[in-house]
Every structure is written in structure tokens, then in C-alpha cells.
Image: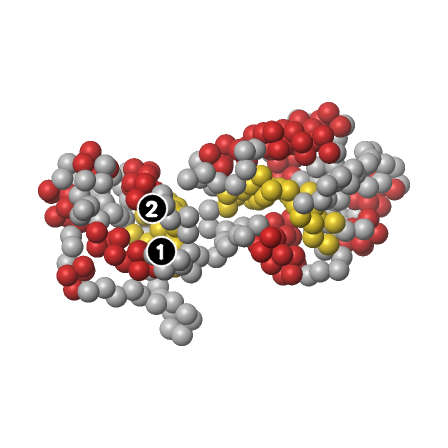
Amino acid sequence: MSGETIWLFGLPCSGKTTLAEGLIGPSTVHLDGDYLRNTLNSDLGFSKEDRTENLRRAAGVAQALNEQGFDVVASFITPYRSQRELIAEKIEDVSFIYVNAPVEVCEERDVKGMYEQAHNGEIDGFTGVDAPFEEPEEIGLEVRTATHSKEKSVEKINTELDLKFDPSHIFIGRWQPLHDGHRTIIDSAADNGKDVVIAIRDTELSEKNPLTAQERRELIEDVYEDHPNVETMIVPDVDTVAIGRDVGYSVVSVPEEIAEISGTETRKEYGKSELLAGRHFED
């Protein structure tokens, strides 16, 4: 299951990072321009050529993460149309969102004083002051953060892109292996169109846990390949899961004959290759 990238672009302090934080979901990685500038791209300056290289590298990271099944939310100024075209070429599934705010509003929001420093000549090549920002010729999706709240803007993005980052059901387990008992529990939500996340505990290999977390993930994704509402993720091994009272969480109950299906007995009956191929599932 491949991921997708949402690319937020606009003037400095237009609200890109704020919106990105509202779009991050359970399998989402946030690529932020400031962070990459201080780490992966610390060798680059702010000439047009260096800005383009900065974005080329970021797009490469986003595509690599997408190929591993992660969604990406990227927040970069991305001032030139040619740079957006380059990103569209590098990332297979990318949606651009123009975070539009007047430069006067961006200056008012600038707690770091970058705009003032640029006006005073202390920063050269600052977008919106002495470096251009090229407005998109064709605006696909635009949010105006000067007139709409963060919540309204995030809601618009989710609606326009048909995104739902908040699953209604999360199932945490070892799934060693996933079997028909597990499928009955998960299918009770997935087959009814609910958004589901299957969280796979990253348990150490042992006689009791012969399959790696990645092997189990691939098996589960193969089983649910026709369910776009089902996502998988690998989580650190879990010691305790707490269910709060009156906070909306519930524990799924299943018929006794389903609860009695044993992963241990399944592992005894089938070899590892058979389990990974799903041969233990009922027809």
C-alpha cells in the first residue's frame, strides 16, 4: 500500500506548519522546511539554485516514504512555479495546497522577526521581501489563513482531498499469525465501511512469535488489499492497553467459538511459509 504526499506551499509565516500539524495522522510523516534546512540540507544556501536543490531532496525523501507506505505532509515555501513542477515530477502521488495569506498578515505573525531583518538588509533573498513568490497560475486547492481558522482550513483540505486521518477503530495485537478469529473482529468494522487501523506489535522473534512484524504486516495488507479503509502500522511492543471509562472507547466482544480460535494451535498446524501465504484461512 503506497502513501501519498500533501505539499503545502506559501509565503513565510502563512500558516503552512500550523496546518501540517492538523493533518498529521497515524501513518503520516511531516517534512518541515526549517527542520530539513538544519539537518539534511544544512549545506545549502538561499540562492534559487540552492532552494531548488533543497526541494529536490525533500521530494526524494517524500517519494521514498510514500513507497514504504507512509503518507507525507510537506510544508515548504516553494516560491517558484518551476520548483512545483519539479516536485510533481519526483512524487508520484502529490496534492499541492496553496496556503494564501497577504504579506502584511505574514509579517504580523512573524515572531522570529525575519521579515524585519530582511527589510533592514540583515537577511538576503527573503521570499516576500527581496525574493519573489510566484503565484500559481492554476490554483487547485487554496486555503486563506487570514480569513479562516486553522480548524476550518484543515476541514476544507480533508473534504477536498477526501481525507480521513482519524480512524474510528484501532486494533492492537501480535497477529502471530492473523487468523480467522482476528479477521472476524476486524471485519466487523472494516466491512461496514469504518476506518480501521491494524497496529502490529513489534515483538521479538521466538518460538511463540516466529513471524517478524514486517512479515505480518505484508500478510495483513494482502488480506485487506481490497479494503481502502484499512491501514496497517507497526508499533513498539505493548505492555498495557488502558481503556478509560466514559471516554468513548470500547472493547470488541465476539462469539465464544470465535474467541476460542488459537494462534498457538494454528502455528503448530502450519509451517511459516504456509502462514505467510495465508493457507491457514478458511475458504
Element type where label 2 sits in the image: loop
Q: Position of residue 111 (x, y in %)?
A: 75, 52
Element type where label 1 sits in the image: helix
State left or right for residue 219 relative to residue 32: left
Quadrant in which the N terminus is drawn: top left
Residue at image coords 84%, 46%:
116
Q: Is residue 227 visible?
A: yes
| Labels 1 and 2 touching (C-beta < 8 A) | yes
**Image height check: is 81 above or below 103?**
above
Residue at image coords 85%, 36%:
130
Identify the image's colour scheme: rainbow, by chain, secondary structure or one colour.
secondary structure
State left or right for residue 214 relative to residue 208: right
State left or right for residue 233 relative to residue 103: left
Q: Position of residue 168 (x, y in %)?
A: 42, 60
**Image height check: is 111 above or below 277?**
below
Residues at marks 1 and 2, CA–CA distance in whole angstroms: 9 Å
Q: Nearer the viewer, residue 72 or 221?
A: 221
Q: Is residue 54 visible?
A: no
Residue at image coords 45%, 38%:
2
Residue at image coords 39%, 46%:
233
Q: Position of residue 150 (x, y in %)?
A: 66, 58
Q: Mark 1, residues whose alpha carbon is within 10 Å: few (<14), some, or many (≥20)? A: many
Q: Nearer the viewer, residue 247 or 193?
A: 193
**Kind of residue at badge 1:** Ala
Q: Which residue is mark 1?
A: 190
Q: Which mark is residue 7?
A: none
Q: Which residue is mark 2?
A: 224
Quarter of the image for residue 249 reads: bottom left
